[in-house]
């Protein structure tokens, strides 16, 4: 594992996945980079909202606010995106 390989791994995750789920992330994070890559690959992105005061909820809130992700709160909603 090396810092540079994390982004490479995240690109593969975005490419192999039909839906990328972002449960928590800061605005600048590997998870947000994965979400951005998934969007570029025309994959669906889902985000779980969290407390508005939580640092680790800023990423999902930004994705939802800018309509780059589907708001997701249950496993059934993720399954619906996969269908």
Image (cartoon, rainbow, N blue to C red):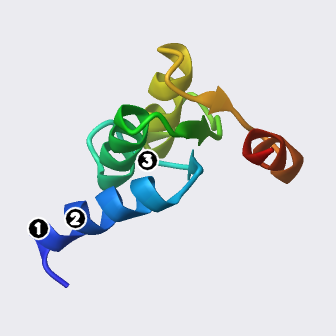
Left or right: residue 70 versus residue 5 is right
**Pointer 2 residue:** 8
Secondary element under disc 2, as helix, strand or loop, is: helix
The residue lying at 39 percent from left, 39 percent from top is 41
The percent position of residue 49, horizontal first and vertical second, equals 64, 35
Quadrant containing the C terminus is top right
The residue lying at 83 percent from left, 41 percent from top is 80
- The residues bearing labels 3 and 1 have C-alpha atoms spaced at a distance of 19 Å
Left or right: residue 8 versus residue 48 is left
Left or right: residue 38 versus residue 22 is left
The percent position of residue 15, horizontal first and vertical second, equals 41, 55
For residue 34, say whether it is visible. yes
The percent position of residue 19, horizontal first and vertical second, equals 60, 48
Quadrant containing the N terminus is bottom left
Residue at the farthest right position: 76
Q: From what the image shows, is residue 21 above or below residue 2?
A: above
Residue at the farthest top position: 66
Q: Earlier in the sequence, mark 2 or mark 3?
A: 2
Q: From what the image shows, is residue 80 above or below residue 67?
A: below
The nearer-to-camera label among 1 and 2 is 2
The nearer-to-camera label among 3 and 1 is 1
**Pointer 1 residue:** 4
The answer to the question of whether label 1 and label 2 lie on touching residues, with beta carbons closer than 8 A, is yes
- The residues bearing labels 2 and 3 have C-alpha atoms spaced at a distance of 18 Å
How many other residues sit within 10 Å of disc 1, few (<14), some (14-19) or many (≥20)? few
- The residues bearing labels 1 and 2 have C-alpha atoms spaced at a distance of 7 Å
Left or right: residue 27 versus residue 61 is left
Secondary element under disc 1, as helix, strand or loop, is: helix
**Pointer 3 residue:** 25
């Amino acid at each position: 594992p090396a810092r540079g390989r994390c982004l490479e791994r995240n690109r593969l995750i975005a490419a192999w996945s039909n839906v990328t789920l972002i449960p928590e992330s800061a605005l600048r994070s590997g998870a947000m980079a994965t979400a951005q890559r998934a969007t570029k690959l025309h994959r669906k992105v889902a985000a779980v909202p969290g407390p508005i005061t939580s640092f680790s909820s800023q990423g999902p809130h930004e994705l939802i606010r800018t309509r780059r992700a589907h708001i997701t709160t249950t496993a059934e909603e993720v399954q619906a995106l996969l269908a």
